Amino acid sequence: MTLLLDQFRSVIVWLLTAAAVLSLMVSDYPEAIAIFCVLAINTAIGFFTSWNALRSMEALFRLTAVTTRVRRDGSSVLLPVAEITPGDVVILEAGDVVPADLRLIQVESLQCDESALTGESAPVTKTSQRLAADTLVADRTNIAFKGTAVTRGAGIGVVALVGAETEIGRIATLAQTAEAAANPLEKRLDKLGQALVLITIALSGLIGIIGFMRGLGIVEMAETAIALAVAAVPEGLPVVATLALARGMLRMARRNTLIERLSAVETLGATTLILTDKTGTLTENRMTVAGFVLEDRDLTSECLVQNAADAMDLRMALEIGALCNTAELSHSGEKGIGDPLELALLEIATLLDVRPDLDPDDRPEVGKHPYDPAFKMMATQHSAEGRYFVAVKGAPESVLESAIEVLGATGPQPLTEAQRQQWLDRIEAAAGSGYRLIGLAYKYTDSTEEPLLERLTLVGLVKLLDPLRSDVPEAIAECLSAGVRVVMMTGDHIATATEIAAQAGLGVGGGIVAMSEASLQDLKSGRIDSELGRQLAETNVFARVAPETKLRLVEYYQDQGHVVAMTGDGVNDAPALKKSDIGIAMGQRGTQVARDAADVVLKDDAFTSIVAAMWQGRVIFGNIRRFVVYLMSCNFSEILIVGLAIAAGLPAPLVPLQILFLNIVTDVFPAFALGLGEGDRNVMKRPPRDPQEPIVGRPQWIDIAVFGLLITVATLGAYWLALIHLMLPVHEAVTVAFLTLALGQLWHVFNMRERGEGLLINSVSKNPWVFAALLLCLALLVAAYKLPSVAAVLQLSPLSSEEFVLAAGASVFPLVGGSLWLALTRNRSV
């Protein structure tokens, strides 16, 4: 019901409603019925295009539709998530969805995928250790968060928070309280409607005074007021705008972009700032090996193939990565099950044909030391020619601390303190470049009882990255050339985020400026001084940001006058997606929560699709402006025709139903044809429009006035000649005026070409839809004139050949005059 009532908040709707009520008061039932039919059509369109908004948060609550294993009274039971309470002990295993925020008390190689919640691209290793109370969400490794997935290991946790108090519950609350901002098109159309109301009231008042002075009766004045109200309102505007946007939506669908709200197409064209997530949006959301750091050299991924065959240390590193591993590749070798980091190690070992784990007779596994948060390492023990080979991987600093030797080109050598410091420097440098680092080491033992994580031989480091999507740099370059600022918001570490941003080209011209969550506390509290404002204006990377911070950033940039597009794929992005002017969700990697909260869904997750959508949005705005000028100039001429005739003491040259017929039938189809124009291919080489720029600015109002005057002169001239020169009865002279106006408005569509274009060859004449629209309108006009029942309702009378020539000849005047006006103003910038 609320959605239905929202459709009646438009000032245009209220103006038409007033005209319909006035028609009922003077017993003019056909006019009242016609106006109410127009209102019904517009209301239905608005209602059904808004219906999908009700689904935006339902997916958040669908996350709770799971059961969980709880230990009660000494035994384990399966319970619906809704029945667990704080204090319950929950048992987690790989594949489970965490049912509440749990304080972990026991873990065994437990890892959780929190990418949808925090933006981290890799699973988070959990611990049962105590942490400081002010630890950031992304660093709370002793908490298993509701809605995240257990990807590895097992654990036991005590329920700390349930429902709305959980981290995901707080995000749901944020999304529900984050009101979607009215998009630019809605704002502009509303301002246009308000201007129309003011014009109508002013003209009605003026005509009322004139009519009172001339002694007109109440019924005559009421009919005049109805005619003015109908003439002032472009009834076809909402329909044409909707159809033009729908056309843009279909074009976008062919480019893998699904539009949830029609107006989102135009809003993309007005975008001045894109706030983009990193994981899964700019990157591929998978780990890949970028290279190895060995004792005497660093190898990039491009150099691995030529070094793998004869490099002992590289082969050893590949073997350790494949052996100290719990993941499994699929038979195709492309995808598998397990930790993305371990999958990446298996993939690179397979690519270089170093996979000792594939042969059960080659170093079979005989023991394992699962990942230990205290040591930050894991190890596997394998039988090897009468001894045991131990493969170790873990945090680089931890592996280095446990090493006593380093594998060089000629074999193992003692690890000196100087070398140890050099390795620490290399670790710091690689981490600062945005890589995720894993230390690799090994040892031989004579017994399965010996400690596995001591007295190791360091082999090197493996560098891993969530790789940048190959098409992102070009897409971002196009955004920057179009004057659209791109800012990254991610839950990843600042070093990783900075490196990805640099690769993507965000720092072109001014370098990468990054801020972390800790630097944004004043933003969250609303205390924004000039220094923070300056930093926010320069920053192009926000790292480790929480959901509330993303929402506050969207609000801040909107307050600064930006039209904000927000991209995201996780649950943590939902509030900001909803609040932004245009929310863009990833269709492949995105969560259902993000997709339901967004206005646009990218089926291919390609950032390039955003650029295509922005191009389409800019074209749509240009087309909308063009047909608005066309419709408004037609309607303005109708106001002048009625008003000036009454002021001059002439009988009304048009009746309300004739005006309604023109506005709904003959005006709409040429306007729709204008809305189907292909647009300017160079539109993305221009800066974005001023977000405050109206659809109809001062230059467009001047065009509307000039074109409207030309149509008025033609129509009133033909009407005056029919009354005075030909001395026709009023009803025949009204028919002459109606036909002159109808034909003049049809030819007027060719005045909507770009300035500087030719009269015969131009963007309008090249549009086949324009000629189809003209033929259809002419057919409808002939039908209205020839069908007795329709002609009677419209009060049209038969005309002679001479009278037809008068109407047809006068109708050409607006096209000729309009062409002269376009030629005189061809150098106008807007």
Image (cartoon, rainbow, N blue to C red):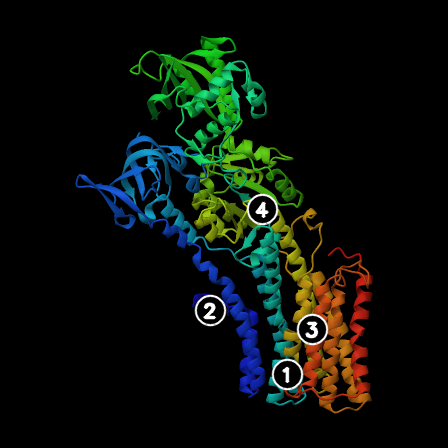
Check whether the beta carbons of the residues at disc 3 and disc 2 lie within 8 A of each other.
no
Residue tagged 2 = 5
Label at residue 224: 1
Report how far apart the C-alphas of labels 4 and 1 lie in the structure: 48 Å
Tell me which numbered mark, 4 or 1, is placed earlier along the sequence: 1
The residue where tag 3 is placed is: 776
Within-10-Å neighbours for mark 3: few <14, some 14–19, many 20+: some
Q: Is residue 215 left or right of residue 375?
A: right
Q: Which is more N-terminal, label 1 or label 3?
A: 1
Q: Residue at x 61, y 58 (%)?
A: 248
Depth check, front residue: 339 or 332: 332
Q: Is residue 602 above or below residue 640?
A: above
Which label sits in the foreground, 3 or 4?
3
Q: Is residue 702 visible?
A: no
Residue 205 drawn above or below residue 191? below
The image shows residue 466 at horizontal and vertical percentages of 51, 33
Identify residue type, mark 3. Leu
From the top left corner, tell me how far across and down residue 651 is, in percent. Answer: 70, 87
Distance in Å between CA atoms under marks 2 and 4: 33 Å
* C-beta proximity under 8 Å, tags 2 and 1: no
Inter-mark Cα distance, 2 to 1: 30 Å
As helix, strand or loop, the secondary structure at mark 4 comes to strand
Nearer mark to the viewer, of 4 and 1: 4
Q: Is residue 5 visible?
A: yes
- Which residue is pictured at 53% across the width and 47% down the height? 566
Given residues 384 and 291, the one toward you in this image is 384
Q: Nearer the viewer, mark 3 or mark 2?
A: 3
Q: Secondary structure at mark 3?
A: helix
Would you say 174 lies left or right of 312 here?
Answer: left
Q: Secondary structure at mark 1?
A: helix
Within-10-Å neighbours for mark 1: few <14, some 14–19, many 20+ = many
